[in-house]
Image (cartoon, helix red, strand yellow):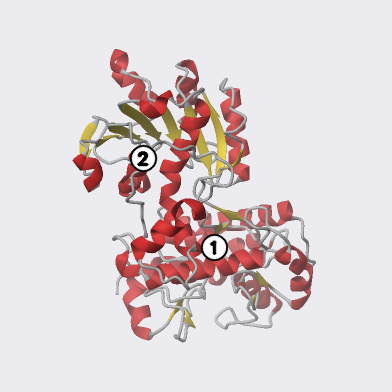
C-alpha cells in the first residue's frame, strides 16, 4: 500500500506502522537504517521503501558519516535532568532545526511534510531532550556500542506511551510536571491524561478511515437550520452542548458510547465558521449584521485546508437564517488558479436550496494587500477579514505587515488566530505595532471556539496546540 496521506502521530513516533498505520494487534519492527519508523510486516516496509529511502539514508548518515553533525547534536546536552521548560524547548527546537538542516543538505532539497513531521515529532526525553539517535551517538562515542546496533532506547510512560525519558532518574524528575494540570488542555487534565485522549482520538479516526476524504481527514457539519440567530458568546456554550446530540444522531453513535472524541474530530473544521461568527458578534455593536441579505467574509492567507473544508462554512448560513447569500473570498499565495479571481457557486443543503439561499466562493492566489490593490475602486470592505493560524510571527513575516497596514488603514473588521499562546502573543504585538487597537475579547487569549482536538507540540517535551486554539487579535 503506497501512502496516500500524511502518517498520523503514532506512526511518526514509531508506535504504529509507517505504511498502513496499524498499531493494535500487530508486531512492530523498527527500520534498521534510521531506527526512526516502524513497520508491521516486511511487505509494508517494502511498499514504503521508495518513499522512505531518501530520508532514511539522510538520517542514518548523520551518525554514521557526519561526525561534525553528530557532535553538534551533543552540544549543550547535560546528563542532569531539568524541568525548566524554556531551556528544554529551546534545546529541542535547536536539535530539530539542526536535523532538518543536515537532512536538507544531504537530500539537496526541502523536506516534505511527512519528513518534517519525522523530525518535529521525534521522541525526546522530557528532562534533557535526548533522543534515541543521540543516545546511539553517545554510546558509539564512548566505544560501548556500534552505531549499527540498537543501544538503550527512551523509556515511554507506561500509561500514555506518548511521553518519554532516557532513564528512571529523569522520569522521576519529569513525573510531577507530566502529572500536573496542563494549561493547554481542559478540565484540569494532565499531560499524561491528554496524551491518552490524543491516542484515543487517533484510534477512532483510524477505525472510521473509510468515511474520510482522500486526505484521510474526517469532516462533519450539522444539517439543521436555526429558526433565529442565537449568540455564540453566551455563557455555558461549548462544542458538546452545540453539536454532540445532533452528531450522535447523524453518525449513529450508540447511546452508551461517549461523544467527546467525535466532537473533537468535528471541531477541527467547524472551528472556522464558529470563530467567524464569534468575531462578527464581538466586533459589532448590535445584531444588524445578522439580518443582512448578503454577508461577505474574506479569508486571508487561505490554504488547501480551508478549500477542502468548504462544506463546513454553510454552518454560517444555518445559524443566520435571515442571510440569503454568503460570499467567501479565499485569498492567499498558496491558492491554485492564479491571481485572477475565480468565482464558484457552491451547492447548499436541501433546506437552504429550497429557500433560495446561496453560498458563493471566490479564489485568488494573492496576498490580501495585493488583492485589495488590484481591485482598486471596485474593492468593497467585507463584514470580516480573518486569517486562520496565520503564522504571521513565524513564517512569511515579510508579507503580512503590508496586509496589517491595509486592514488598519481601511478600518476593516479583522481577526487573526494562532495555534498556541506563544504565536498569539507575538502576533498581537505585530498587530499593535501596525496601529491596530485590539478588542479585549478577541485576544491574545484562548479561543472559545478553537478546535478541541489537541496535538502535542512538535520539537518540545511538553504542551499541546490546536487549530485556531488562540485568538491573536481582533480589531476594527
Residue drawn at point x = 50 percent, y = 62 percent: 260
Q: Quadrant of residue 297?
A: top left
Is 89 situated above or below 256?
above
What number is the disc on residue 121?
1
Question: What percent of the width, then of the height, locates residue 265?
Answer: 44, 59
Could you tell me which quadrant the N terminus lies in? bottom left
Name the one closer to the observer, 298 or 108: 298
Residue drawn at point x = 56 percent, y = 32 percent: 473
Question: What percent of the width, then of the height, locates residue 108?
Answer: 41, 55
Residue found at the far front of this picture: 227
Name the one closer to the observer, 476 or 259: 259
> SS class of the residue under badge 1?
loop
Q: Nearer the viewer, mark 2 or mark 1?
A: 2
Residue drawn at point x = 24 percent, y = 30 percent: 341
Mark 1 burial class by Cα count in 10 Å: few <14, some 14-19, many 20+: some
Residue drawn at point x = 33 percent, y = 59 percent: 215
Question: What percent of the width, then of the height, locates residue 234?
Answer: 55, 40
| Mark 2 lies on residue | 227
Question: What percent of the width, then of the height, locates residue 158?
Answer: 64, 78
Q: Quadrant of residue 381?
A: top left
Among numbered discs 2 and 1, the one appearing first in the sequence:
1
Mark 2 burial class by Cα count in 10 Å: few <14, some 14-19, many 20+: few
What number is the disc on residue 324?
none
Q: Is residue 340 visible?
A: yes
> SS class of the residue under badge 2?
loop
Amino acid at each position: 500500500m503506497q501512502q496516500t496521506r500524511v502518517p498520523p502521530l503514532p506512526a511518526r513516533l514509531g508506535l504504529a506502522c509507517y505504511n498502513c498505520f496499524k498499531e493494535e494487534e500487530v508486531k512492530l519492527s523498527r527500520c534498521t537504517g534510521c531506527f526512526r519508523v516502524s513497520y508491521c510486516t516486511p511487505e509494508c516496509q517494502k511498499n514504503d521503501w521508495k518513499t522512505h529511502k531518501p530520508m532514511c539514508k539522510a538520517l542514518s548518515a548523520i551518525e554514521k558519516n557526519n561526525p561534525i553533525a553528530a557532535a553538534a547534536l551533543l552540544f549543550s546536552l547535560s546528563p542532569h535532568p531539568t524541568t525548566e521548560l524554556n531551556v528544554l524547548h529551546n534545546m529541542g527546537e535547536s536539535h530539530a532545526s539542526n536535523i532538518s538542516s543536515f537532512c536538507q543538505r544531504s537530500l539537496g532539497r526541502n523536506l516534505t511534510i511527512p519528513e518534517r513531521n519525522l523530525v518535529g515529532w521525534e521522541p525526546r526525553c522530557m528532562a534533557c531532550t535526548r533522543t534515541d539517535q543521540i543516545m546511539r551517538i553517545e554510546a558509539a562515542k564512548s566505544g560501548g556500542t556500534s552505531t549499527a546496533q540498537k543501544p538503550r532506547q527512551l523509556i515511554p510512560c507506561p500509561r500514555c506511551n506518548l511521553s518519554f525519558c532516557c532513564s528512571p532518574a529523569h522520569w522521576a524528575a519529569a513525573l510531577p510536571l507530566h502529572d500536573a494540570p496542563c494549561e493547554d488542555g481542559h478540565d484540569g487534565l494532565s499531560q499524561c491524561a491528554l496524551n491518552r485522549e490524543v491516542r484515543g482520538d487517533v484510534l477512532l479516526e483510524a477505525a472510521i478511515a473509510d468515511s474520510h476524504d482522500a486526505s484521510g481527514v474526517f469532516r462533519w457539519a450539522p444539517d439543521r437550520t436555526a429558526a433565529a440567530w442565537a449568540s455564540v458568546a453566551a455563557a455555558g456554550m461549548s462544542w458538546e452542548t452545540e453539536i454532540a446530540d445532533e452528531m450522535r444522531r447523524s453518525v449513529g453513535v450508540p447511546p452508551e458510547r461517549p461523544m467527546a472524541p467525535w466532537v473533537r474530530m468535528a471541531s477541527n473544521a467547524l472551528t472556522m465558521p464558529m470563530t467567524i461568527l464569534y468575531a462578527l458578534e464581538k466586533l459589532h455593536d448590535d445584531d444588524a449584521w445578522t439580518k443582512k441579505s448578503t454577508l461577505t467574509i474574506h479569508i486571508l492567507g487561505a490554504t488547501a485546508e480551508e478549500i477542502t473544508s468548504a462544506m463546513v462554512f454553510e454552518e454560517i448560513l444555518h445559524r443566520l437564517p435571515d442571510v440569503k447569500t454568503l460570499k467567501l473570498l479565499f485569498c492567499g499565495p498558496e491558492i491554485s488558479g492564479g491571481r485572477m479571481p475565480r468565482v464558484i457557486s457552491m451547492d447548499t443543503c436541501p433546506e437552504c436550496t429550497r429557500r433560495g439561499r446561496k453560498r458563493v466562493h471566490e479564489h485568488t492566489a494573492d496576498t490580501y494587500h495585493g488583492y485589495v490593490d488590484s481591485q482598486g475602486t471596485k474593492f468593497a470592505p467585507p463584514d470580516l477579514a480573518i486569517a486562520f493560524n496565520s503564522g504571521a510571527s513565524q513564517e512569511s513575516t515579510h508579507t503580512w505587515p503590508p496586509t496589517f497596514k491595509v486592514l488598519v488603514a481601511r478600518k476593516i473588521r479583522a481577526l487573526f488566530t494562532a495555534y498556541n499562546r506563544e504565536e498569539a502573543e507575538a502576533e498581537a504585538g505585530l498587530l499593535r505595532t501596525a496601529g491596530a487597537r485590539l478588542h479585549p475579547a478577541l485576544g491574545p487569549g484562548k479561543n472559545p471556539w478553537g478546535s478541541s482536538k489537541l496535538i502535542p507540540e512538535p520539537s518540545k517535551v511538553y504542551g499541546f496546540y490546536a487549530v485556531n486554539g488562540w485568538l491573536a487579535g481582533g480589531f476594527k
